[in-house]
Amino acid sequence: MNKQCGEIQKCLYVQGRQATPGEQKMLNNRAALIAQRNEVRDSQLDALLAALAPMEDIYAPQATTSDLGIVQNDAMQRNRHQLLKINRKSFDKKELAKHYARAERRLESLKESNAPYRQVQRLQRMMQGYQNMLALEQIVKSTDDQLEQMGSPRLMDSIPTTARERQLSFEKALDAHQEAIDNGYI
């Protein structure tokens, strides 16, 4: 139909005439199909934007090549805070992964079908946010594992907040210290 309509429009332009009723009907049918396709495309794009909305403001993990401990600690804490912020959001990660995969499959066709540019840009930003979330989870897990191997507390370990938790934490630290003394480490 596209090829036929293209030929009709070319002939109309070259010949400088109006379309015949049959030609006009075909051009109108094509226009109606395009409008219907655009309506479906826009509703699917809106659904993807709504599903991936929690990912819009997630930034890439902080990285550093500095040997300074304070700079490394700052990067680790920024990543930790960003991941905690993500974890406070209410969304199902499995559902989010499905929507991300669907967005990946649809992105090129959305661009080719002239979907609204700003919405496609926003979708790409959300998709990047999803990738950033995965990278944050990986870098924080890797950092946690390295800290644990060195005997330090993990980044994502909970900090005791209630009086009972603080008391248990204090007692645990005392027991560990006493055990170190008993074993001759101190």
Image (cartoon, helix red, strand yellow):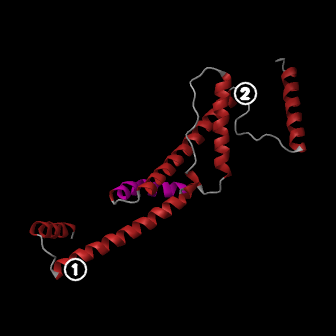
Residue at 82% across / 41% down in the picture?
Answer: 160
Decide: marks 1, 2 in contact (CB < 8 A)? no
Q: Position of residue 33 (x, y in %)?
A: 31, 73
Place residue 179 in its image quadrant.
top right
Residue 145 appears in the rendering:
no
Disc 1 or 2, which lies upstream in sequence? 1
Give, as a three-letter code, the residue at label 2. Answer: Gly
Which quadrant does the N terminus fall into?
A: bottom left
**Residue found 23% across the figure and 74% down from its top:** 27
> 55 or 7: nearer the eye?
7
User: From the viewer's perspective, is residue 104 above or below residue 3?
Assistant: above
The secondary structure type at the circle numbered 2 is loop
Give the residues in magenta.
96-111
Q: Mark 1 points at which residue?
A: 25
User: Residue 143 in magenta?
Assistant: no
Query: How would you rate the neighbour count of disc 2 (Cα within 10 Å): few for under 14, some for 14-19, many for 20 or more?
Result: few
Secondary structure of the residue carrying numbered label 1: helix
- Left or right: where does residue 156 sit relative to residue 113? right
Q: Does the magenta stretch include residue 100?
A: yes
Is label 1 or label 2 in front? Answer: 1
Q: Which residue lies furthest to the left in this view?
A: 15
Q: Is residue 74 above or below residue 83?
A: above
Name the quarter where the C terminus is drawn: top right
Q: Position of residue 141 (x, y in %)?
A: 62, 38
Disc 1 to disc 2, how far (Cα)?
Answer: 77 Å
